[in-house]
Amino acid sequence: MSTDDFVSSDVNKALQEARQIVTKGKRPPQPLNEHLIEESTTVQVNKSGNRTDPVEVIISRSKKFTQDSSDDEYFGSLSDSDLLPRARTVSTASRKSCKHHYSDAELEGFEKSKSHKKHTNVRYRRKGNELWTKDDEDDLLTDGTVSEFEEDQARLEVDVKEECRDEDGEGHVVIKTWSARWTVQHFDLLPEWLQDNEYLRHGHRPPLPSVAECFKSILSVHTETGNIWTHLIGCVAFFFLALWFLTRPDAHIGLQEKLVFSFFFGGAILCLGLSFMFHTLSCHSLNVLLIFSKLDYMGISLLIVGSFIPWVYYGFYCRQEPKITYIAMICVLGAGAIIVSLWDKFSESRYRPFRAGIFVAMGCSGIIPAIHFVYTDGMRVLIDENGFYWLVAMAVLYLFGAFLYATRTPERFFPGKCDLVFQSHQLFHLCVVVAAFTHYYGISEMAMKRLTSSCPADESIFDAARHTEL
């Protein structure tokens, strides 16, 4: 292997350590012959602000340790001498001092002291789906500048600083500092587990090393920003709406109504909240992505069940048997959808139409009790007393959003033009939030009309004045 493309074991070790922290959020095991004295790690995420620019992840690591010396080959130094021409890589004979870290050429100019310093900068880049390769430009840099790469490339830069101090006895202290910068600018250069929508070309977040950095990215502009904020705002809005509703005096809103509406509020808050968490943490790691994608789909099932229960409860308010039957039916369907959601393959991108179909079918199960109601009470009663038009508006919004989500419209017709706004997932989120508020208004109208009237068997159970704030 030539010196031009050879990566020394030490710099390669730093490279692997940087990538492991970036992608997995954890460090590799400590070498057995190192005795750690002090260590610190910092992570910084930068966004330049331009539409096609990446989020840049910078990891800085400082480490101070003692190293045992022996006559065996030394593996712990952070030297990059293997990257230098062979004429400059002849080491001194002594393996019991810092001098064996450096070549003869590097030792020239060193003061005759017990402390030696070295600075190395190695850059790597990747184009398309190729492997990481070392940049052909200057091997050793001292100014820390970053070369400009083409837009469809990723780059990884490892900056190494080392200070070695001889100690009395058979060992020495090494203080090494390295920083790694990893930048991804294009969909094709993302890890496979982050490649969800090939029509969104730029502005993707790279894998972030910690939960804190994922939450910090909420304030950055990227492909998930709209998805995060649409459901975060919706979740907060429903939380305060539920808080207002459930804290009303019982003289205004009865305990039974609070219980029935709680299923809807709980489903809406969990659905929107879990969706917000999923889109925030999806770039953390593959395991986190899989866990929160399952919770996201589970939240959708809970919203459908929670929306179904109040409509059936007030639609069949005076008939116990169909009311219990249809509520039980949607609960069973919801449980089945949750079980399917926990299936690992269900979260894969290729199952997007299947996911949409499952939830559409679950939502359309509401047609069965609607047909039953029309058969027993007539279409006029369904329209006048059961908030029919509001429920139709809700269904249209859900179906329209699901259609956009499944077909990836409009970005499939304008690849790279909807990376930040007007992508299908954002529009789907907006449809879900608007549909949920529409449903709330519809079931509130239903409850008002049911509670201000009476069942045929009992003409004077309810007091209309008690329920004017539903």
Image (spheres, rainbow, N blue to C red):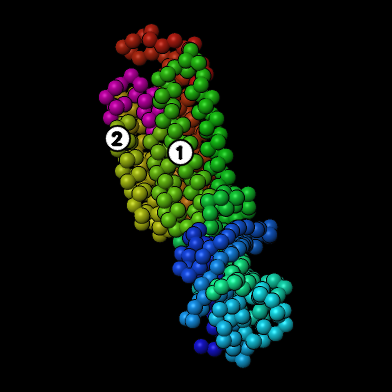
The relative height of residue 9 versus residue 415 in the rendered view (above or below) is: below
Relative side of 334 to 37, left or right = left
Q: Does the rendering let one see residue 270?
A: yes
2 on left or right of 316: right
Viewer-proximal residue, 60 or 423? 60
Kindly report which numbered mark, 1 or 2, lies closer to the viewer in this rendering: 1
Residue 344: where, in percent of width, then height?
Answer: 36, 55
Question: In the orientation shown, which residue stands out farthest toward the top?
Answer: 460
Residue on which disc 2 sits: 329
Front residue of this view, candidates 47 and 452: 47
Residue 230 falls within the magenta-colored stretch: no
Amino acid, disc 2: Met
* Residue that label 1 marks: 270
Task: Give percent across and percent down for residue 51.
Answer: 66, 59
- Give the magenta part as a residue range: 307-325
Whether residue 82 appears in this view of the structure is: no
Secondary structure of the residue carrying numbered label 1:
helix
Q: What residue appears at the point 60 percent right and 63 percent down from the top-left corner?
A: 62
Q: Residues within 10 Å of mark 1 (few under 14, many from 20)?
A: many
**Between 202 and 290, the one nearer to me in the picture:** 290
Say which residue appears at 39% left-offset and 51% top-offset. 355
